[in-house]
Amino acid sequence: MSRPRKHHFLPQFYLRGFSEDQNSLYQIWKVTGETVGCRIKDIAAIRDFHEIDADDVEDPLALEKELATVEGQMSTFLSELLQDGLSNDRALVGTIGFVSLLRMRVPAIKRHIEESLGETIRTVAGIMERQGKLPPPPPGLEDALRVANLEIAISNWKCMQLMFGMASNPEILNIMCNMQATLFRASRGSFITSDQPVALYHEDKTSAYGVGPATPGVEITVPLTSAALLRLTHSEAEDQERIATAAEVAEFNRRTIVMAEQYLYAGSNPAEIGARAVLLKDISAGFTFDMLRAGRETVQIQRCIPVYPAGT
């Protein structure tokens, strides 16, 4: 039996919610606006993305197989929420779990983890090198084996462990489940999604510390289908459902575009979406880290940069 190598970081059931025919979508490049029609089975997927490459694991595809079961449950939660609305508490809680998974399961998060861990390892190894605590390299390889010249690779299993661990963090899930929820409805084709579909929005651009789900004033928005979007806030108001205005649709799509790392996905109007994406191509949001060095001291600061109001 052939081994499945194409692993979807956005579930196919989720992508079908943005498709006009349940089979295809337009993939739109954020930077260029270039558009191509694709089958859903061929997009939002990376070769061996969920592979567990630890030496002592019998089945490297164990996570990919387990996700098939998990996604079946999440598909049910999402379908029930879209049908019953926010009165279905079970479906809302289950969908919020799905939102948390969508937030942490994407390539942008994996790349952040790889770069952050890689810099941490290089920094620690550099300190040990300067203190003479590393084994001496063989003659003639001194320069090649200098820490600054080494290529550092993070095992895929470690990235998956951290990504799915953050997605299932009970404290974060509890915060999100206690936020005020608004379910926006719109005509089919209104909302778009991306390769980083969960947007954290905040109005205050003066804070240098980034935001998280617990930050006062933060809003979490995620398109659920092309006709529905969920917003979570720290408002004291009751949960509500309403029809999104044209201005709200445009704003939520702006947040989705800003959050996108490379690709947007839509079932219709690709030229219009591509043109807007190009206008926003230089604006980005999401996890980042800074290495601050002062002499021999190094500090790594990790932040989640939110989407800010338009024009700021």
Image (cartoon, rainbow, N blue to C red):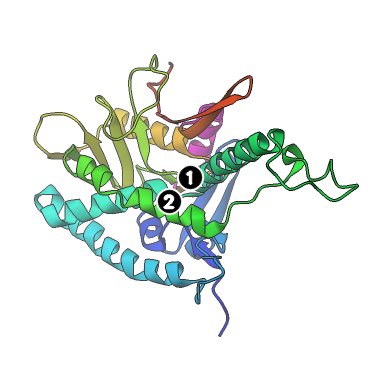
Q: Assess whether mark 1 and mark 2 are in contact (beta carbons under 8 angstroms).
A: yes
Residue linked to disc 1: 109
Question: Dot 2: within a 10 Å radius of its alpha carbon, few (fewer than 14), some, or many (20 or more) residues?
Answer: some
Left or right relative to 52: residue 127: right
10 Å crowding of disc 1: few (<14), some (14-19), many (20+): some
Q: Can residue 186 be seen in this view?
A: no
* Highlighted range, magenta: 266-285
279 on left or right of 254? right
- Helix, strand or loop under label 1: helix
CA separation in Å, label 2 and label 1: 7 Å
Q: Position of residue 231 (x, y in %)?
A: 25, 38
Quarter of the image for residue 120 reads top right
Find disc 2 in the rendering and name its residue: 163
The quarter of the image holding the N terminus is bottom right
SS category of the residue bearing label 2: helix
Magenta stretch encompasses residue 99: no
User: Residue farthest to the right?
Assistant: 140
Residue type at numbered disc 2: Met
Q: Residue 260 location, x and y as percent?
A: 48, 39
Q: Which residue is drawn at 51% across and 44% down?
A: 113
- Residue 205, percent from left and from top: 39, 17
Q: Does the magenta stretch include residue 268?
A: yes
Residue 181 circle label: none
Q: Nearer the viewer, residue 41 or 8?
A: 8
The answer to whether 174 appears left or right of 162 in the picture is: left
The disc, 2 or 1, on the residue closer to the chain's N-terminal end is 1
